[in-house]
Amino acid sequence: MAVTELLHDTVLRTIETLGPVGTLVVTLFLLLYAGVVLPAVWSRHAYRRSAARTVLASLGDALGRLARAVRHLMR
C-alpha cells in the first residue's frame, strides 16, 4: 500500500470518527504544534526560539480574549 493511500485512508477514517469540524480542529492543532511549539523548544537558534515564544504568547492572549468573549456571551 502506498503512502498516499495510507494517508487518504487515515484522513477518511478521521473524518468519519470526528466529523469535519473535529478533523479541522485536530489539523489546526497539529499545524500549530509542529510550526510553533516544536521550534520554541527544539531550535538551536535563539532568534527562532524567541520568535516562537512570541507567537505562542500572542496565540495564548488571543485564546484568552476569545474565551472571555464566549463566557460573556454565555451569560
Image: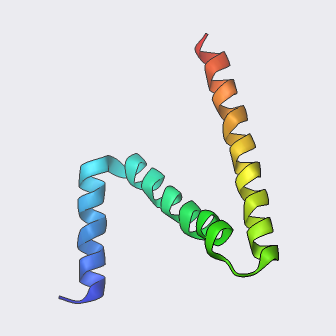
67, 73: nearer the viewer:
67
What is the number of callouts on the image?
A: 0
User: From the viewer's perspective, is 3 left or right of 60?
Assistant: left
- The outermost residue toward the left is 1
Drawn side of residue 17 relative to residue 20, left or right: left
The residue at 30%/76% (across/down) is: 7
Q: Position of residue 20 (x, y in %)?
A: 37, 51
Give left or right: position of 53 versus 42.
right
Viewport quadrant of the N terminus? bottom left
In the image as oriented, which residue stretches furthest toward the top? 75
In the foreground, 66 or 54: 54
Quadrant placement of the C terminus: top right
Q: Residue 65 at x, y = what percent?
A: 73, 33
Name the residue at 68% across, 25% down.
68
* Quarter-of-image position of residue 71: top right
Farthest-out residue, bottom:
2
**Residue 59's x, y, as percent?**
70, 49
Quarter of the rendering containing residue 43: bottom right
Above or below, 34 relative to 18: below
